[in-house]
Image (cartoon, helix red, strand yellow):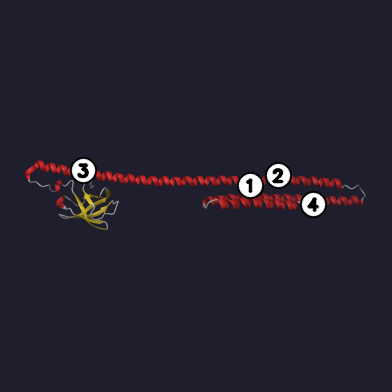
Amino acid sequence: MNILTKICVVILLVLVLFASIVFTTMATVPQNWRGRYQQEQQRRLLSDQAVRFAKLLSARQAEELRDAEKRANDLATELADAKKDKVADPTQTMVAEFKLQLDTANARLAELQLNVEAMAKRNERLSEQLDEGRKTVAGLQKENRRSAGEITQLLGKVDRAVLVVAALQRQLNDRDERIKDLETQVVGGGTGKKAGPSAAAGLSGTIKRVKGELASINIGSAQGVVRGQKLLIYRNANFVGYLRIDDVDQGESAGTIVDKQLDPVAGDKVTSRDQLK
């Protein structure tokens, strides 16, 4: 096998190694475009280095081959001159010298092959470490998304619990007020007084109609409702929103729904507890 054939074999081996690394990585790495782009940049850099290395190796081997050919031509010329002058044949010495140079070139070529193989193995280890890092990051991102979802659910449960507690507290306050009113009526006996609008701190009513952001209720000025007042809207133990009174009649009022958490419907309850001015 001559030197040119060995050079071709080395170059082919380098290209096969890098091609195998590229195809193996393409078959195993998940579709991560950003990581894929960085990996392709790294591979392109390694490939360029390998190409430059192969070119340098080829140029060096070509130069050595030219030097060897020139040396062989010189030896052939000297041998021809020696034959003409009937001088002793120096062929054995020249052949030995040429063989020594060839062995040196082969040893250098083998060393370069070992370096190429070591570089390929190191690149393979770097690719494996990169894949493991991407998997770790993906796992952490998945865990963060799961934790964020759980936190959001817990916050929603806490908010709902707060609304339930507030609604229950309002119901307890309403019952306390009604108990106090009944006690007052029992103690007052036959005075014949009726609670007027000024005694409507615990007024409550029901939504009659809802149209868009407007709603009407079944209590009015006779029960103590005034314009600009904010009434709390609730359904069972769930907070629905507020009704800002815009128009007041004697037995009916209407207003705009604000700060709603749920869509009000006819039949929802309204109360003046915790009212906002």
Q: Nearer the viewer, mark 2 or mark 4?
A: 2
Q: Secondary structure at mark 4?
A: helix
**Residue 40 seen in render:** no
Q: Secondary structure at mark 2?
A: helix
Q: Position of residue 221 (x, y in %)?
A: 15, 52
Gap in Å between the C-alphas at discs 3 and 1? 79 Å
Q: Amino acid at mark 2?
A: Glu
Q: Amino acid at mark 1?
A: Ala
Q: In this orientation, which residue lies closer to the viewer: 257 or 261?
A: 261
Gap in Å between the C-alphas at discs 2 and 3? 92 Å
Q: Residue at x 16, y 42 (%)?
A: 179
Does label 3 or label 4 sit earlier along the sequence? Answer: 4
Identify the disc placed on residue 173: 3
- Marks 3 and 1 close (CB-CB < 8 Å): no
Q: Position of residue 205 (x, y in %)?
A: 19, 51
Circle 4 Cα neighbour tier, 10 Å, few/some/many (<14 / 14–19 / ≥20): few
Q: Amino acid at mark 4?
A: Glu
Q: Which residue is mark 1?
A: 120
Q: Amino acid at mark 3?
A: Asn
Does label 2 or label 4 sit earlier along the sequence? Answer: 4
**Residue 125 seen in render:** yes
Q: Which residue is mark 2?
A: 111
Circle 2 Cα neighbour tier, 10 Å, few/some/many (<14 / 14–19 / ≥20): few
Circle 1 Cα neighbour tier, 10 Å, few/some/many (<14 / 14–19 / ≥20): some
- Marks 2 and 4 close (CB-CB < 8 Å): no
Gap in Å between the C-alphas at discs 2 and 4? 23 Å
Q: Nearer the viewer, mark 2 or mark 3?
A: 3
Q: Residue at x 78, y 46 (%)?
A: 101
Q: Is residue 53 left or right of residue 91?
A: left
Q: Position of residue 143 (x, y in %)?
A: 45, 45
